[in-house]
Amino acid sequence: MSAAPVWSVDPRTGNPREQVAVEATAEEVDRAVRAAHAVRDALADRAARAAFLRTAAETLEESGEHIVEAADAETALGPARLSGELARTAAQLRAFAEVVDEGAYLDVHIDHQDGSRTPPWPDLRRYKIPLGVVAVYAASNFPLAFSVPGGDTASALAAGCPVVVKAHPDHPATSELCASVLRRAAARTGLPEGVVTLVHGFDAGVELIRHPLVSAAGFTGSVRGGRALFDAAAARPAPIPFHGELGSLNPVVVTGAAAAERAGEIGAGLGGSMTLGAGQFCTKPGFVLVPEGATGDQLLKTLTETVSSTGSGVLLDHRMRDAFVAGVRERAALPDVGAPVTPGAGGEHTVSAGFLTVPAARLTVEGPHDALLEECFGPVTVIARYTSVDEIAAVLARLPGNLTATLQTATEDDDPDAARLLAALTPLAGRILVNGWPTGVAVAPAQHHGGPYPATTSTSTSVGATAIERWLRPVTYQSTPEALLPPELREGNPLGLPRRVDGRRA
C-alpha cells in the first residue's frame, strides 16, 4: 500500500493546490530520528551552533519572498502579517545565537571542597547539557514563528539538540520550503543537514513521540491533540518532557473605574485585539468581564461599532471554519446569551466576527453555560456583565489556566478594586497585563509564554531566552580531576563563561 499524499490546500477556496509530499511511514520516522541522533556531536560546539542560527536567519530572509508567497497561499494570513512573522522568526534565531554566545544558559556552579562544613563538602561542579533529539510539532496559526523554523526549533538547536519537525497539514509546502532553508544554512556553516528533519502525517506524529531516541517534545495546537501526545509521552517506557501549548481563554477584567474613565477606548481596543488575524491568535482575549450599567453599555457600543466594521475573514482551514460556526451557534443558543454582533459564517469560505453577552451570574456555578468558559478559535469573544467585584471573583475562581490575563483599570485616579482583581488574575496565567491587550508576544528575555494547564503542560516558556531551558538537564561532577572535566567546568574558566563560584558570581 502506497503512502498517503500530502496536499497543499488553498483555504480561500478549499481547493487542493499541489501535492507536496507523502506521509511518513513508521520506518521513515525511525530513519529520521536515528539520523538526527547520529549528528548530535556536530552541535556540541557553541560557536558552530551560534553561526548556524545566524546563517539560518540570513537564509530565511534571503528566501523571504518565496516563503511569504507560499505561506499566504496555504494560510490566507496575508503578506503583511506573514512578512512580520518572518522578521520575528529571523529575530528569534539571532536572539538564540546571542544566548549561545553568552553561555549563561549553561548555569555553571562551582563549589570548591570545604572540609570545615558539617558535613564536609566535596568539590562539586554543575552545568547543563542537551537532552538529545527533540520532536517539534508545528502550529497551524503561525506557519513560521511557531513551526519549522520557529521558537521551539531555534531554542532546541541553541541547546545543542537536533530536531525532527512534524509538519502541520495546513501549510506543508511552507514547511518543506523552510526545512530546506534550515538544511541549506546547516551546510553553509559546515554542519550536517540532518540536524533538522521534517516528517508529514498524523501517524508519523504518533510514531515520533513514541520513538525511544526522542528525548523531549514541543507542541503548539489544540487541547485534544496536545493532551493525546502528552499522555503518549508519559506512557512511554522512559517518559520524556512534553512542553505543549494547548489552549487559552485569556480573560480580561474591566473595572468599573476603568469603564467610567475610558469605555470607548477599551471597547475599540478589545475589538481590534479579538479580531486580529481573524481571531486566530493563541492570545486572543476570548472572555471579558464588563460592568453592568451605563459605562459598560458605552463600552459595548464602541465594541459593536468596531467589530461591525471588520470584514469577513478566512480561517486557516475549512475544518476550523466549521468548528467555529458550530461553536458560536451552540453558545448563542444558551439561555440569556445575546449576540449584539452575530459571529458565524460570513460566506462560503469565510467567517464574520462578533461577540456574545451573558450575565456573569450565569457563570458562577457549574452548568451548560460553562461552554462560554472554553476557547472558541476564531473572531469571537464573550462579554460577561457583572454587578459586583464579588461576582467577578466567583467567575474567575472557575476559570482554567491561561497564557494571559488582563486587567483594565483606571489610569488617572486610584482604582479601589485594582489590587484585589490583579491578585485574583495572577494565579490564572503566565503573563499578566495591565491596561494593554494580550495579542502580540514580544521576543524578549523577560517574556513568559505559558501558563497553568490547559494553557501549557509545563511551567516553561516557549518564547524568550529561557525557552532554551526546556531542552537541557543539569549534571554535577564530584571530585573530578581537572583533566577529566568538561572545559565549561575547569578551574581557569577557559571558555570565559558566566558562573557562580562558591556562591558568588565570577
Image (tube, grey):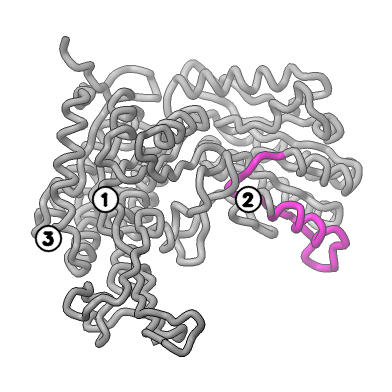
Residue 247 relative to residue 370: left or right? left
Mark 2 → mark 1, Cα distance in angstroms: 30 Å
- Amino acid tagged 1: Gly
- Amino acid tagged 3: Thr
Q: Residue at position x 33%, y 28% from top?
A: 206
Residue at disc 3, secondary structure = loop
Q: Residue at position x 37%, y 84% from top?
A: 112
Q: Which residue, given by chain and number where applicable, does mark 3 sit on?
A: 189
Of labels 3 and 1, earlier in sequence is: 1
Give the quadrant of the C terminus. bottom left
Residue 10 relative to residue 429: left or right? left
User: Which residue is more in the foreground, 255 or 373?
Assistant: 373
Q: Where residue 132 is drawn, which disc sits there? A: 1
User: Which residue is more in the foreground, 36 or 305?
Assistant: 36
Mark 2 → mark 3, Cα distance in angstroms: 40 Å
Image quarter of residue 467: bottom left
Residue at disc 2, secondary structure = strand
User: Which residue is more in the foreground, 87 or 236?
Assistant: 236
Give the quadrant of the N terminus. top left
Residue 237 relative to residue 387: left or right? left
Residues tagged 2 and 1 counted as in contact (Cβ below 8 A): no
Task: Determine if residue 144 is in view.
Answer: yes
Of labels 2 and 3, earlier in sequence is: 3
Task: Determine if residue 272 is in view.
Answer: no
What x and y, as percent, mark residue 166? 30, 35
- Amino acid tagged 2: Ala
In the image, the segment drawn in magenta is 399-426
Q: Residue at position x 57%, y 19% from top?
A: 345
8 vs 382: above or below? above
